[in-house]
Structure formats: C-alpha cells, structure tokens
Amino acid sequence: MKISDLESYDTMIYGGGLYAEMIAGVSLITKNIQKLEGKKIIVFTTGITPIDMRRYYDDLVMKKNFKGNTYEKIKMFNFPGKMILSELTLPHRTAIIALKKLMSGKENPTEMEKLLIELCDADGDFSDRACIAELVAYAMQ
Ligand SMILES: Cc1cc2nc3c(=O)[nH]c(=O)nc-3n(C[C@H](O)[C@H](O)[C@H](O)COP(=O)(O)O)c2cc1C
C-alpha cells in the first residue's frame, strides 16, 4: 500500500502486531504524518503483553513508535493478540528463544524482565473480537 492510496479517506484505521515494541508496518503512517494532516488516524496493536499494563503501552510503545509530536495526531488502541509457538517462523521462534535466554541470564531482573520471560512461553490465541467495540465507537464519532 502507498500513502497516496490513503489520501482520499477522512478516517483511517491501521493495525499491526507488536515486535520488540514496534508496531509492524506503522512507518507507512508515521513517515507520512504531514500528508495525513486533518484526518482521523487510528492505530491498533496486537500483542501478548497484558492490556492492563498501561505503562508498557502508553509510555514504551507510544514513545518507540510515535516520535516527536506524532503521538498527538494518532489515537492508539491495544488488543490481545495471538502467538502460537509451533506456527512461528524460524526467525521469530529464534528471536523468542534468544530473548528468553537473555532475560533469564539477568542476575536481578526487573518486574518487566520477569514478565518478558513469562511472555516468551505465551502460547495461544488471546484475541477477542469484542475488544474492538471501543475502537469502532471512536471511529464513528
Ligand atoms: C519475535 C516476536 C516478538 C514479539 N514482540 C512482542 C512485543 O514486544 N510485545 C508484545 O506485546 N507482543 C510481542 N509479540 C507477540 C506478537 O505481537 C503477537 O503474536 C501478535 O498478535 C502478532 O500479530 P501478527 O500475527 O498480526 O503479526 C512478539 C512475537 C514475536 C514472534
């Protein structure tokens, strides 16, 4: 998809999985934010980090993905995602194994690092269609 494909819409909704806190493909939006001035831009994430971990989403994910004042122009929603270990690509499986090894080797892991170790073993589909109600309501406003 090119940014020119989006220019004729007033509202856009973009969703991507989280990979090391980065929203897959979101640069299509962030790199072209000036061209999208005045539009309602909604971005949702899917991930395995529990949704009630608001500091993770509202601080870390926001800061890593939306630099400068980009975050002011975007409304973000976060939804539980799906990670089936046996279905991961080899690079993704390797990344998860490496991350778990790295975190497990820490002498005094922080609470976040402890959670990351646990999340590396998350294996399932945690997605729930009902979660999108809030996003839909916002988009319709
Ligand atoms: C290598 C790798 C890194 C991941 N990093 C994160 C992460 O930083 N935060 C998170 O919440 N979930 C993370 N996940 C879980 C994915 O975001 C989750 O499986 C998501 O639903 C994937 O969406 P997709 O299949 O549409 O790409 C990661 C998964 C993999 C395989």
Image (tube, rainbow, N blue to C red):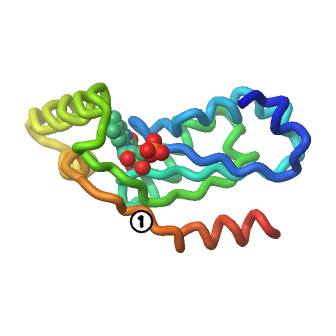
**Residue at position x 87%, y 46% in the image:** 9
Res 60 visible = no
Q: Residue furthest front?
A: 87
How packed is label 1: few (under 14 Cα within 10 Å), some, or many (20 or more)?
few
Q: Which residue is tagged 1? A: 52
**Residue at position x 9%, y 33% in the image:** 105
The CB of the residue at mark 1 lies under 8 Å from ligand 1: no
Res 93 visible = yes
Horizontal arrangement in the rendering, residue 118 relative to residue 59 (left or right): left
Q: Secondary structure at mark 1?
A: loop
Horizontal arrangement in the rendering, residue 49 relative to residue 107 (left or right): right
Q: What x and y, as percent, mark residue 66?
A: 62, 37
Most foreground residue, 122 or 51? 122
Tell me the quarter of the image containing the C terminus. Answer: bottom right
Question: Based on the displayed image, in which of its 4 quarters is residue 31 positioned?
Answer: top right
Q: What x and y, as percent, mark residue 83?
A: 32, 49
